[in-house]
Image (spheres, helix red, strand yellow):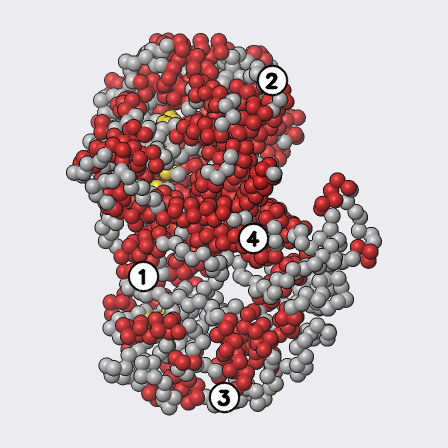
């Protein structure tokens, strides 16, 4: 099996390379979709060698995300502890084996397994360290070397396995019996695929076949900034170095996705007009989704002062984001939320046509709003739910009194009640968002007039909404609980609120290590009093 | 794993410790031969499941205790595959249709149909019907309940249903009228004490009376919880020490601390901390309505009479919204914010009164 | 099957031995079967059980169904009644049939079915309807009918009895189509099944020579649960087939039927039954079934059934099952079955409200919930109490009732019972103590 097969393998998207990482996260298997966010981006030395050896890449056309692949553990932008965890796994993995998933059908998968099993062709060299001189020859050919351990990495799951995961489980079991190399599954996590993960790798299967799971978090912004700075300085010969704030913005808004950040940086640096302070200049059309609407403001994301759409927000980072073509979701989201949270009011004398409230409602009187919440929501192109939840996550710090809190929180509760009925949800979404945004704005009693003194909040970082992760986690835990304690048929509520806590307290003999672990997880509460976000 | 709850569960109607009159009625019901559909309801931990098993034992004999766990598969009309686990014996099958969420209707129709059609006229037991036990019937969707009613009528001849739920408020009247309702009320504190003492005796332990009363009170007349507590106490310290506090589940302690935080300080910063703790509780599978009720219980302790009424009205209001809405955290937080505002007002008025 | 079977028996098939086969299939000796045949409904149920329990239509069930005809003829020839009239002796004999036989295979008839009125005259308390139907029975035409009213007042029984009297037992199957809410009644069913049935022709005479009306009847039970689209489809069928088909719709709320249909039907309101009628029927059933019941229990049944005869009979039957044959049915059992909160408990609760103590109220509410009573039940009983309460002013009552309406809605939406009850009773408490 030689080059041809290797090429075929590569073509068919199996990266038969030793990877210094091990991921057992389920993935959003949109096969062929290049937009799948990968949460880590390290490749090992060998793949590096592969590229250098096999193809002559041109300086200009290569993506920085490929060029700057980390060559050694030192260069990884992932948290040190994770890297250690993974290295430890590799030490263990020599005796074990994992599984490889085939791509499009289970038989192809099956066959691939058998084929891959035959070629102990992959080198596991992380232990030994980077050696860039390896050529592709050493990759191929059968090696019976005992000290060379191999690993098969699988990245994408065919859809059929999500629908009927029993086939997948059977194949895994078969491989476990006869396979020789450890298997590594790389799976990306996304919000709409939580059940898929559970289906492919249910907890009891993972215990049966001794699959370990290492979950990787999105890369921290600080690490990203370091990496971006390093790359930027390395490339500074050809392109002007972008300013620190730009790098920060990119880091923050790429949500931990290294590849995306590098691409953005490359793109940003490659622009002809490097006028990144877009506040004054009319922005060129960045590669953002067009709104496709008839509204005149839709196509051009002008956050300049021509409209009374909350200009001068003070965070130029937002506008940069617009120009740089950052991940669409992220910019729109943080921009929109920022606009609402840092809202401004206008001088009533300039807006004479705004009617005034009767005297008995004077405490509700406010100067006219300079930001148009509905406009913001519309431009954000996000579902009302999503936008509201981000607003909810961040609004508390902008209020100063408990009475304000009381009012604003009630509006959020109203907003959720509006989107409760699934039959009317489409229609009521926009109202729900409006209620949330205007509710917060009105409740903020610090800013009732155009000249109200603003308290110095400093730069308040905006946080991601925790609701979605929390509820996903809760659902997963309930499912695990039900699976692990299947034979007893307690209702989930009784199981979680009574049985599990008391199992923890009275320590009966549990035979299933999965059960033991789960009980411990469920009964430990973090005692830290700081706000962990 | 064998908790006391399971080990000492009575297996026949004769062995039940309380509600003996009802047990006698059940026996007569079985003897009468004209066994109807049953709807067993009552608060949590009162003994509904136990009584259902005892009735099944009375109907079919000890063979009903040979249980096996099975995974059944169903396909929805939209071709989605569902899997649900069931516990069954040769004579009955027990299932919780709410396990599959929105598709509970399919499970009910298919499962009962299967059970009713595979009917062996087992002459040894002289019963020509099988029993299907459905739990958490009050969590069924309305469509599922209507489907259940149709199925009940259709397969009455070969299949009897025993439905189990906490309250009949959420069960449609059409089903209630087709079943014989059996109300299982919570045992009294004394009855719980007695049972605890008996169980401890069987375990070879001595349980002081004060300890038994303490546990029975703390359990809120929930027998299952009382037994779990007692077992935990035994593990923590034996001989029992009545002076020592009864151990509580971790989440209850955590919830109480959260309530203390709320009462201590009312500010946006504090609300953020509380929010973090609420998220923590949610990810540990504590249902949001349980969180709400727990918070209320703790917070009421720092309120006076007039305030209590106002707080409880708000709790009911937000809990209702919580059930209807999708994001529990909004409503939980709104309740906390509301409480903070009410409490702050109350404190300020109190101070104003002084001057 | 009365004459000789023509032709030889096919080779290889064993000769059918009627007696043995029926014994294995039903488990009852022949003498029992002959007696069972005498009660038509009981017999029908026996057959239904047995044929339903056999998944395949195998030879024996075919045999059995033809056998049933033979038995019917035999019984008829012997002069047994066809069970159309509510006979005391009939009731008694069928009562013994419904006891468990040695192998326990006979079907037990619910009393609701057993004591359904068989003739239009037997229907209790609904005079207008009865008058119209009687006229039709005497020969005049029948309009499309719409029966509405609270459950258990005799709507379904009336139309079925009338149909039976009009068409006689033989034609009944052909001329009457019953569609219940349990059956599928979407638009497609309306279009196919109903339409097909409506298009069959109907002759003028019965097989036994007596005249019968030249139309068919389609009974749509629980019509208010049909979707609006199905109802619209129905209306067109109704219009087209008026010559040969009459429709009878039965529902609880007339407002849920679309207007084009209600305008084509003669509407009859079925009133809730009053206590005397209910109690006399109940007493008759008790005698028929040999149930011993005390008077207080009868009034408990009347109170908890609220004018619903079906509910009353069901409570009676359930109580007798729980008590067994030899015990007198007491009122406690009835209240238990009905899930009714005892009066003393409710009064104690209301008295606690006057104490203006939140803690006492909390204890009382928790107790009631621990006893397992449904919050909706507590609510409806509270309502009955408050409305006639002399010590409350109108304003207080109106505030309380408004709160009750809100709580009822919340309970239906699935809110927590304890919280809703606490909220409700706090309002009651504040109205009683501070509301003047």
What chain does badge 4 belong to?
Answer: B
- Residue B49, located in which quarter of the rendered image? top left
Give the camera-side residue of A214 and A78: A78
Per the image, label 3 sits on a secondary structure element best described as loop
Secondary structure under the numbered disc 4 in the rendered image: helix
The x and y percentages for residue A277 are 68, 76
Q: Chain of mark 3?
A: A
In the rendered structure, find residue C141 and report the number of the disc placed on it. 2
Q: CA distance from mark 3 to mark 1?
A: 41 Å
Q: Quadrant of residue A111?
A: bottom left
Identify which residue is drawn at 43% across, 18% down.
Answer: C344
> Nearest the camera: A252 or B341?
B341
SS for callout 1: helix
For the point 58% across and 30% down, the residue is C403
Residue B151 percent location from the top left of the image: 41, 35
Q: Is residue C41 above or below residue B287?
A: above
């Amino acid at each position: 099996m030689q080059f041809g097969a290797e090429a075929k393998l590569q073509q068919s998207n199996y990266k038969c390379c030793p990877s210094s990482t091990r991921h057992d996260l389920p993935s959003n298997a949109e096969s062929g979709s290049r937009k799948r966010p990968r949460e880590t981006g390290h490749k090992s030395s060998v793949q590096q060698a592969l590229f250098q050896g096999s193809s002559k890449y041109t300086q200009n056309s290569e993506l920085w995300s490929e060029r700057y692949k980390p060559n050694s553990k030192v260069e990884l932008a992932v948290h040190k502890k994770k890297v250690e965890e993974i290295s430890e796994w590799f030490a263990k993995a020599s005796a074990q084996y994992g599984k490889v998933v085939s791509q499009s059908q289970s038989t192809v998968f099956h066959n691939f397994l058998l084929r891959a099993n035959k070629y102990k062709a992959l080198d596991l060299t992380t232990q030994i360290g980077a050696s860039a001189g390896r050529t592709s020859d050493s990759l191929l050919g059968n090696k019976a070397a005992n000290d060379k351990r191999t690993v098969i990495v699988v990245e994408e799951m065919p859809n059929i396995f999500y629908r009927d995961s029993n086939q997948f489980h059977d194949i895994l079991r078969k491989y476990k019996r006869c396979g020789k190399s450890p298997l590594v599954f790389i799976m990306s996590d996304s919000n709409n695929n939580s059940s898929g993960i559970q289906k492919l790798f249910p907890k009891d299967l993972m215990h049966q076949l001794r699959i370990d799971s290492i979950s990787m978090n999105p890369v921290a912004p600080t690490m990203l900034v370091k990496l971006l700075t390093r790359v930027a300085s390395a490339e500074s010969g050809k392109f002007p170095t972008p300013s620190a704030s730009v790098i920060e913005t990119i880091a923050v808004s790429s949500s931990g996705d290294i590849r995306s950040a590098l691409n953005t940086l490359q793109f940003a640096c490659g622009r002809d007009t490097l006028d990144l302070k877009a506040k004054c200049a009319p922005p060129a059309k960045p590669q953002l989704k067009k709104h496709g609407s008839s509204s005149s403001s839709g196509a051009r994301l002008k956050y300049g002062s021509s409209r009374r759409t909350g200009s001068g927000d003070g965070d130029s980072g937002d506008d940069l984001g617009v120009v740089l073509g950052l991940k669409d979701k992220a910019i729109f989201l943080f921009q929109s939320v920022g606009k609402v949270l840092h809202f401004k009011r206008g001088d009533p004398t300039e807006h004479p046509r705004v009617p005034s409230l009767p005297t008995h409602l004077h405490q509700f009187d406010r100067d006219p709003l300079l930001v148009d919440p509905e406009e913001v929501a519309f431009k954000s192109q996000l579902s009302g739910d999503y936008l509201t939840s981000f607003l909810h996550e961040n609004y508390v710090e902008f209020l100063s009194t408990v009475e304000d809190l009381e009012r604003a929180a009630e509006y959020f509760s109203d907003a959720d009640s509006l989107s409760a009925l699934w039959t009317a949800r489409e229609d009521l979404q926009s109202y729900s968002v409006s209620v949330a945004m205007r509710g917060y704005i009105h409740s903020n009693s610090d800013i009732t007039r155009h000249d109200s003194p603003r308290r110095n909040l400093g730069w308040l970082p905006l946080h991601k909404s925790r609701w979605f992760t929390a509820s996903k986690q809760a659902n997963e835990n309930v499912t695990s609980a039900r699976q692990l304690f299947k034979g007893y048929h307690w209702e989930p509520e009784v199981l979680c609120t009574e049985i599990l806590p008391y199992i923890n307290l009275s320590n009966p003999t549990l035979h299933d290590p999965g059960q033991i672990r789960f009980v411990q997880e469920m009964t430990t509460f973090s005692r830290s009093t700081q706000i962990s976000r | 794993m064998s908790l006391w709850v399971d080990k000492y569960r009575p297996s026949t109607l004769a062995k039940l410790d309380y509600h003996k009159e009802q047990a006698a009625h059940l026996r007569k019901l079985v003897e009468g031969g004209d066994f109807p559909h049953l709807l067993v309801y009552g608060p949590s931990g009162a003994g509904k499941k136990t009584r259902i098993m005892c009735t099944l034992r009375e109907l079919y004999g000890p063979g009903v205790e040979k249980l096996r766990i099975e995974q059944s598969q169903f396909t929805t009309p939209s071709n989605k595959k569902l899997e649900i686990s069931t516990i069954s014996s040769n004579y009955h099958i027990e299932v919780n249709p709410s396990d599959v969420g929105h598709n509970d209707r399919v499970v009910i129709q298919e499962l009962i149909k299967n059970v009713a059609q595979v009917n062996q006229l087992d002459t040894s037991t002289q019963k020509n019907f099988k029993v299907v036990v459905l739990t958490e019937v009050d969590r069924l969707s309305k469509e599922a309940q209507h489907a259940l009613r149709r199925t009940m009528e259709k397969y009455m001849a070969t299949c009897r249903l025993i439905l189990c739920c906490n309250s009949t408020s959420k069960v449609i009247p059409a089903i209630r009228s087709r079943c014989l309702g059996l109300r299982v009320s919570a045992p009294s504190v004394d009855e719980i004490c007695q049972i605890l003492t008996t169980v401890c005796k069987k375990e070879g332990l001595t349980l002081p009376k004060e300890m038994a009363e303490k546990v029975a009170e703390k359990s809120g007349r929930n027998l299952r919880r009382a037994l779990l507590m007692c077992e935990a106490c035994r593990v923590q310290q034996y001989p029992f020490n009545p002076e020592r506090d009864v151990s509580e589940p971790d989440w209850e302690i955590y919830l109480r601390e959260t309530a203390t935080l709320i009462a201590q300080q009312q500010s946006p910063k504090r609300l953020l901390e509380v929010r973090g703790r609420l998220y923590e509780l949610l990810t540990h599978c504590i249902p949001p309505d349980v969180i709400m009720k727990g918070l209320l219980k703790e917070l009421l302790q720092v309120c006076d009479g007039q305030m209590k009424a106002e707080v409880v009205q708000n709790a009911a209001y937000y809990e209702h919204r919580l059930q209807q809405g999708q994001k529990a955290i909004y409503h939980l937080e709104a309740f906390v914010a509301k409480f903070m505002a009410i409490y702050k007002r109350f404190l300020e008025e109190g101070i104003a009164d002084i001057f | 099957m009365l004459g000789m079977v023509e032709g030889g028996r096919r080779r290889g098939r064993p000769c059918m031995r009627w007696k043995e086969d029926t014994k294995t299939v039903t488990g009852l000796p022949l003498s029992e079967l002959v007696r069972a045949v005498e009660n038509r409904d009981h017999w029908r149920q026996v057959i239904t059980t047995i044929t339903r329990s056999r998944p395949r239509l195998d030879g024996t069930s075919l045999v059995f169904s033809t056998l049933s005809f033979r038995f019917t003829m035999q019984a008829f020839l012997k002069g047994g009644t066809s069970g159309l009239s509510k006979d005391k002796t009939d009731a008694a004999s069928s009562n013994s049939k419904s006891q468990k036989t040695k192998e326990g295979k006979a079907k037990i008839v619910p009393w609701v079915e057993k004591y359904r009125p068989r003739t239009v005259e037997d229907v209790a308390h609904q005079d207008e309807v009865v008058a119209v139907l009687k006229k039709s029975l005497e020969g005049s035409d029948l309009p499309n009918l719409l029966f509405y009213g609270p459950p258990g007042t005799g709507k379904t029984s009336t139309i079925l009895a009338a149909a039976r009297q009009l068409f006689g037992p033989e034609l009944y199957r052909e001329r009457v189509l019953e569609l219940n809410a349990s059956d599928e009644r979407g638009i497609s069913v309306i279009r196919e099944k109903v339409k097909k049935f409506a298009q069959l022709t109907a002759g003028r005479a019965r097989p036994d020579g007596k005249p019968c009306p030249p139309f068919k009847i389609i009974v749509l039970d629980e019509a208010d649960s049909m979707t609006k689209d199905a109802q619209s489809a129905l209306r067109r069928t109704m219009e087209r087939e008026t010559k040969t088909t009459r429709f009878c719709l039965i529902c609880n709320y007339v407002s849920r039927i679309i207007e084009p249909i209600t305008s084509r039907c003669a509407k009859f309101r079925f009133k809730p039954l009053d206590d005397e009628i209910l109690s006399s029927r109940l007493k008759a059933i008790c005698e028929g079934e040999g149930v011993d019941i005390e008077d207080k229990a009868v009034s408990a049944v009347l109170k908890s059934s609220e004018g619903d005869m079906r509910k009353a009979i069901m409570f009676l039957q359930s109580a007798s099952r729980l008590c067994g044959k030899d015990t007198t049915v007491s009122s406690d059992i009835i209240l238990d079955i009905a899930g009714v909160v005892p009066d003393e408990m409710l009064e104690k609760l209301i008295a606690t409200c006057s104490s203006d103590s939140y803690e006492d109220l909390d204890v009382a509410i928790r107790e009631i919930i621990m006893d397992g009573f449904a919050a909706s039940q507590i609510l409806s009983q509270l309502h009955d109490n408050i409305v006639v309460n002399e010590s409350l002013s109108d304003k207080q009552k109106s505030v309380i009732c408004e709160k009750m309406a809100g709580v009822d809605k919340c309970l239906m939406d699935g809110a927590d019972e304890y919280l809703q009850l606490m909220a409700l009773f706090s309002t009651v408490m504040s109205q009683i103590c501070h509301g003047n």
